[in-house]
Image (spheres, rainbow, N blue to C red):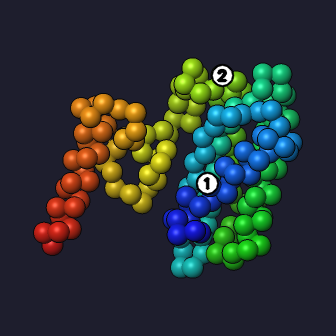
């Protein structure tokens, strides 16, 4: 997993496959914006992917159903490739709940169209569930913004608890 938590590694694999397809594959010309979220659990030495949520920007003239079918094929192919190299990815693809562009076609991307398509922004964007930051993402916010101030306060509390032996 390149020393990443497995969920982060999985997201990187999916992202890389989608971006490659944007450039030269079946999704060529779509993108570039998108968000990915996975939910998984660990059982012993097995990683079980339960849910994948992908919200990916498409061209206005692209068929929504066709776009989603191609996106699904890219994700499935990436997952099967991953399973070939690492047996810890134990979920069968057919058992994974995959949600693609749940709000319909995602046409207007980047900062002009960033309206929280997945509804799961904040801390998940970068830090993931294994890093206790206490809430919102830190990037792009003024130091006094409540998300950023809360994140720093939570981190400081965790460091203090660890160093004091609490």
Is mark 1 in CB contact (under 8 Å) with mark 2? no
**Seen in the image, is 164 located left or right of residue 49?**
left
Vertical placement of residue 18 versus 162, above or below: above
Check disc 2 and report the residue beneath it. 108
Q: Position of residue 45 (x, y in %)?
A: 57, 79
Foreground of the two, 86 or 2? 2
Which residue is rendered at x = 84% and y = 43% of the image? Answer: 24
Q: How many marks?
A: 2
Which residue is rendered at x = 29% and y = 45% of the image? Answer: 151
Secondary element at tag 2 = loop
Vertical placement of residue 68 versus 88, above or below: above
* The N terminus: image quadrant: bottom right
Foreground of the two, 21 or 84? 21
* The C terminus: image quadrant: bottom left
Check disc 1 and report the residue beneath it. 11
Task: Give the label on residue 67, or none.
Answer: none
- Residue 104 seen: no
Q: Residues within 10 Å of mark 1 (few under 14, many from 20)?
A: some
Q: Earlier in the sequence, mark 1 or mark 2?
A: 1
Q: Position of residue 27 (x, y in %)?
A: 82, 39
In the rendered image, the residue lying farthest to the left is 164
**Seen in the image, is 55 located left or right of residue 122?**
right
Q: Position of residue 148 (x, y in %)?
A: 30, 39
């Amino acid at each position: 997993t390149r020393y990443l938590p497995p969920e982060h590694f999985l997201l990187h694999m999916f992202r890389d496959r989608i971006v490659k397809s944007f450039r030269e594959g079946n999704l060529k010309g779509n993108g570039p914006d998108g968000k990915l979220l996975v939910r998984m659990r660990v059982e012993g030495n097995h990683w079980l992917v339960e849910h994948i949520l992908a919200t990916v920007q498409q061209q206005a003239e692209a068929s929504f159903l066709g776009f989603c079918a191609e996106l699904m094929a890219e994700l499935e192919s990436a997952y099967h490739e991953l399973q070939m190299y690492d047996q810890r990815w134990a979920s069968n693809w057919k058992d994974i709940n995959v949600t693609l562009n749940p709000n319909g076609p995602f046409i207007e991307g980047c900062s002009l169209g960033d309206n929280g398509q997945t509804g799961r922004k904040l801390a998940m964007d970068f830090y993931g569930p294994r890093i206790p930051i206490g809430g919102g993402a830190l990037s792009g916010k003024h130091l006094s913004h409540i998300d950023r101030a809360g994140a720093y306060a939570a981190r400081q509390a965790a460091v203090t608890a660890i160093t004091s032996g609490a």
